[in-house]
Image (cartoon, rainbow, N blue to C red):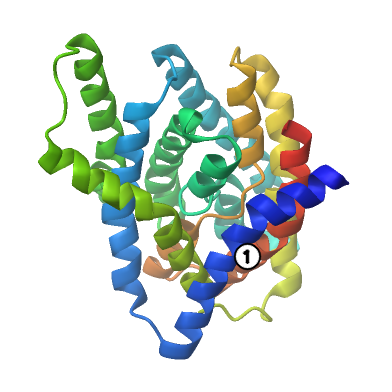
Amino acid sequence: MAVFFDILLNIIAPIFVIMALGFGMNKLFRLDMPTLSRVTFYIFTPVVNFLLILRSSLSTGDVLLVGGFALAQQAVLFALAWALFSLKPMRDKRTVMTLSVIQYNAGNYGIPLVMLFFGEAVISVNSMVMMAQAIVLFTVGMLLMSPTGSNLRDGLTRLVRLPVLHSIWLGFLVRYLLMRFPALELPAAVQVPLDRVGEAYIAVALFTLGAELARTTIRKNFWLAMVPVMMRLIIGPLVTVALIQFFPLDPTIRSVLVAMSGLPIAVNIYLIATEFNHDAELASVMIFWTTLLSAVTLPVVLALVR
């Protein structure tokens, strides 16, 4: 119990304080959310991924194993969720509900969590999970949201244009070059701005997430939303613990992946649901409640992996 409260006060509480600032500011001043979200998504997140890959101690083998695990994890959760949500009361909403179970917030929430709890050395785990999730969301996800060939092509085009994706491969390329040629180093005109943006990431990402949640109407679809919410926060970690036994990963990396499996639903589910006019209101309710309830469930998961 002491470990639970230690994690709650020292890891989870600081995260929610910053989110509460974003929530309150958007309630008071109606912030320009599209701009704020784009700044976070197109500048801060790619920069922090690039930097943390450079500083990562993970081997190439571990990186590939993490990527393979993230895809397998989504496949197993997808099969379970799709089967459950195909039952008559939930069938009409099964696409957005299924995607909400397999896509968790490895960026705005996950990166700050891992940095605070595990340190920067294993943050490349987040990067690989984010890349695997983006591949699934912008291919399978977009196909399910609007099942036509043209929209699948649109999804692939969006995937290629994602700055997060390019920051990952570029980070590994630069890391290889710096290790291969020790005399090389990034010039100060590049390194210093990158460092300053990276230092601001945690606050900006959590503030943005809190501001996004301020737009949610939380009373509608409450009981319907609770099914995928519980699957994301409880079944997700249980499936991860079982599946990870088949992957020869370092114990620390395993702990990171199990901890991340208890993260709330990714905001990207709301964004893609809004774009395709596909149960966006339900998506926002699910994101709100998983984020709120993760304040209780995540300390339990973190205590178990500590």
Q: Position of residue 72 (x, y in %)?
A: 56, 28
Label 1: element kind:
helix
- Asked if residue 176 is positioned above or below residue 117 in the image, the reply reads above
Viewer-proximal residue among 152 and 61: 61
- 47 displayed left or right of 225: left
Q: Which residue is mark 1?
A: 286
Viewer-proximal residue among 224 and 243: 243
Numbered-mark total: 1
Crowd band around label 1 with a 10 angstrom C-alpha radius: few (<14), some (14–19), many (20+):
many
Quadrant hosting residue 229 = bottom right
Residue drawn at the location 43% of the way across and 66% of the way down: 208
**In the image, what residue type sits under mark 1?**
Met
Residue 264 visible within the image? yes
Q: Name the residue at the right extreme.
A: 1
Viewer-proximal residue among 113 and 65: 113
- Asked if residue 159 is positioned above or below residue 279 in the image, the reply reads above
- 237 displayed left or right of 179: right
Q: Position of residue 271 (x, y in %)?
A: 42, 64
Q: Position of residue 290 (x, y in %)?
A: 66, 60
- 259 displayed left or right of 138: right
